[in-house]
Image (cartoon, rainbow, N blue to C red):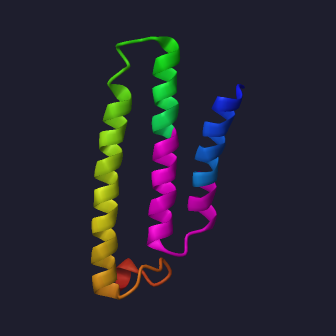
Amino acid sequence: MTPVHFAFSAAFMLGLAGLAFHRTHLLSALLCLEGMMLSLFIALSLWTLQLNATSFSAAPMLLLAFSACEASAGLALLVATARTHGTDRLQNLNLLQC
């Protein structure tokens, strides 16, 4: 494994570990998801550059577009949660109390 591949896989694993073990606030969970998507975007971009394949050149842009849509939906949920519950702590969010 090259150092570049190790760096991006380590960045993805750190985002995944942060999402799994540090789930106190909704904002921190969203930031971990964004870090994972960013590492996937850079890894996919480098993969298409290494292969010199023009057929895969649209894949990183498609991933970036989906990442932007995911971020906007996450921020909308964060604002809605903060307005209805008063906080973004994940312990206070209970779907049965709505």
User: Residue at point 70% right, 25% down?
Assistant: 2
In the rendered view of the protein, which quadrant contains the N terminus? top right
Q: For this view, does 84 lie left or right of residue 13? A: left
Percent across and percent down for residue 78 are 34, 72
In the rendered view of the protein, which quadrant contains the C terminus? bottom left
Q: Is residue 49 above or below residue 16?
A: above
> Does residue 15 show up magenta in the picture?
no
Q: Nearer the viewer, residue 38 or 92?
A: 38
> Does residue 36 show up magenta in the picture?
yes
User: Residue at point 45% right, 37% down?
Assistant: 41
Q: Is residue 98 visible?
A: no
Percent across and percent down for residue 8 are 60, 38
Q: Which residues are magenta?
A: 16-39
Q: Is residue 6 above or below residue 87?
A: above
Q: For this view, does 55 lie left or right of residue 25? A: left
Percent across and percent down for residue 21 are 63, 65
Q: Is residue 21 above or below residue 42?
A: below
Q: Is residue 46 visible?
A: yes
Q: Quadrant of residue 97?
A: bottom left
Q: Nearer the viewer, residue 24 or 54?
A: 54
User: Residue at point 50% right, 13% down?
Assistant: 51
